Image (cartoon, grey):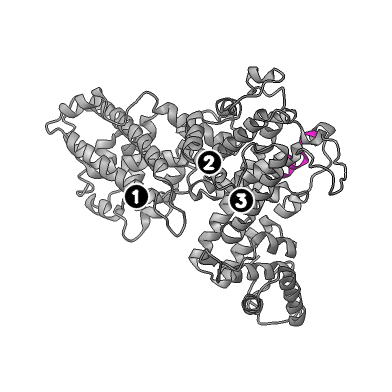
Amino acid sequence: MRGDESDSDSGRTDESSVRKSLEMLCQELNMDEQTASEAMQNFKSIWNTYTLEGEVVHWLACSLYAACRKGSTPTVGKGVMEGNCVSLTRILRTSKLSLIQFFNKMKKWSDMSNLSQEFRNRMGRLERTFEVSTVIFRKFEPIFMDMFQDPQGEPPRQPRSRKHRRLPCHVSDVFKFCWTLFVYTKGNFRMIGDDLVNSYHLLLCCLDLVFGNALLCSNRKDLVNPLFKGLPSIFRLENNTPDEPPCVIDRLCELRDGLVVEAKGIKEHYFKPYIKRLFERQELLTDLLDTPNFIDNNKAINREYEEYVLTVGDFDERVFLGADADEEIGTPRKAAPEPRACQLSARMQVESNLQQHFEKKRTLAPSTPLTGRRYLKEKELLVTPVSSATQSVSRLQSMVSGLRSAPSEALMQIFKSCSRDPIVAILSRVKTLGETFKQHYTKDSEELPGSHMDFAENRMKLAEILYYKILENVMTQETRRLHGKDMAVLLEQDIFHCSLMACCLEVVLFAYSSQRTFPWIISIFKLRPFYFFKVIEVFIRSEEGLSRDMVKHLNSIEEQVLECQAWTADSVLWEALEQAHNKVPTVEEGKVHGPSQICFRKRQVERM
């Protein structure tokens, strides 16, 4: 906790004791002298200004981590590497500081030390990766145990001498191998690392690969759970070994909240080419689970991942596999579970305790809004963050199912009925907005790594389909309400179309649990929050397929705008009020008017 400034040194830990603690910490970490000296200097500065609550060694760990990440280390053949080759995991283990404690203390340390925004952004990405990995691991364990034999039922290993032959891998070894393969692969695709939906489908790809190799290896079918519902019937026959590993992605998606199209896209465009390169470079050997190959493959993938953690990753996601996972993560121990729960896994209960940590994050659980409750449908049963995310994408896809990313015949007829056909301007504007979105979505920023163009084009296509659907619904409603009056004036308003497309993209990004949350979309379109705010209610009224969480998300944006963003000095709200002679419309006036009169009334804001 950030302490109060104090002029008194009474009650402070003796400086020599602090220095001794730091020296012991650095000695265990084999820390270089320059980093240790900088950490001590920074710690003393904060220590003399604030009262630091809790263990001194925990604050020393924060100071050390910040100092470690400021420098760079030359490497053989790979240029200069950020940091000094001391991983966050080692710092936390040595100082006996849990991950959740670390994130909480590091935020306070960043404030007290006035660390750079770049460093804070890095910490934000690191915490997001931790959150996503925790959610994914909670899904991984029960899925693995459904596909493979229960590791709890394995007989204890017998000690062997060096002369004994290599023993076949156990199910528990395959469990650890599969998770390590997943986190290593995920780390090599920066655009996937903190994306919940993509990460989950990548996990399914890893499970599919390992499961297929278990069936491919004639003497390793004992690893497979014969009761797995996704096991092809032909492989239930004895002595039936396929030439190619079977694909169970479709069945996994059906059984485990996956989206087939998304999962197959990840598999074909990312996972398969990457695994192929690992085989070609002989970092992995074919027949993954064959007895001699598996030991080499397991060593290789762990070695490569350890190098990744030291050079890029920082957070060792194998922490979930350890016997001390609950202590290292920071979840409280629970009372002894029932025998059946023990068989399923003690750590599933440990991971479930992390939900209280996630509930603080808008990205994994949208907050309940104070406004717009009349639009909320009956609460849906969303069991986990993964099922919630995949259901959001599934709902989005059902909303645009059967539609094209182009105006329908009905919408074209509305355009032609106008005194001036707006079709050319609309198509041109959509193309321009699409190029702007894809350029920024794939570009690295201080806060986020750039995504792949395939993802950008997919998101944009969904938004275009939704845009034309909503536009048609709005124009149909307005035509009926205004009894066939000319719609050319509304359809020629650039701000209206830009706001509507921004709203469609915001819904798409939310459905995919993207980190590019509001106000990212309006910043790239250079759109004022006031204009975006005015299209939200029109959007919600015009699309009945929106899920409860989508509506809540849009309502939360309304609150953000109402609370602060609409009242900035440069807000167009002041211009609108001035042109309305400082007469604020009443709630009743807002309810009876449609988008052409209230939401985009040219009399109020001429530039619209």
SS for tag 1?
Answer: helix
Res 130 label = 3
162 inside magenta stretch? no
Cα distance between the residues tagged 2 and 3: 28 Å
Please tell me whether mark 2 or mark 3 is closer to you in this view.
2
Q: Quadrant of the N terminus?
A: bottom right
| Residue 270 horizontal side relative to residue 354, left or right | left
Q: Reading the chain from its start, which is encountered first: label 2 or label 3?
A: 3
Up/down of 309 relative to 441, above or below: below
The 10 Å Cα crowd at callout 1, few under 14, some 14 to 19, many 20 or more, is some
User: Label 1 is placed on what type of residue?
Assistant: Gln
| Viewer-side residue, 260 vs 394 | 260
Cα distance between the residues tagged 2 and 1: 29 Å
Give residue 166's quadrant in the image. Answer: top right
What predominant SS class does the magenta segment belong to? helix
Q: Disc 2 vs disc 3: Cβ atoms closer than 8 Å?
A: no
Give residue 464's quadrant in the image. Answer: top left
SS for tag 2?
Answer: helix
Q: Reading the chain from its start, which is encountered first: label 2 or label 1?
A: 2
SS for tag 3?
Answer: helix
| Viewer-side residue, 522 vs 126 | 126
| Residue 238 horizontal side relative to residue 546, left or right | right
The image shows residue 482 at horizontal and vertical percentages of: 22, 28
Please tell me whether mark 1 or mark 3 is closer to you in this view.
1
Instruction: Identify which residue is drawn at 35% across, 43% down.
Output: 502
Q: Which residue is mark 1?
A: 439
Cα distance between the residues tagged 1 and 3: 28 Å
Which residue is most to the left?
Answer: 419
Q: Which residue is mark 2?
A: 276
The 10 Å Cα crowd at callout 2, few under 14, some 14 to 19, many 20 or more, is few
Magenta residues, as a range?
Answer: 343-350
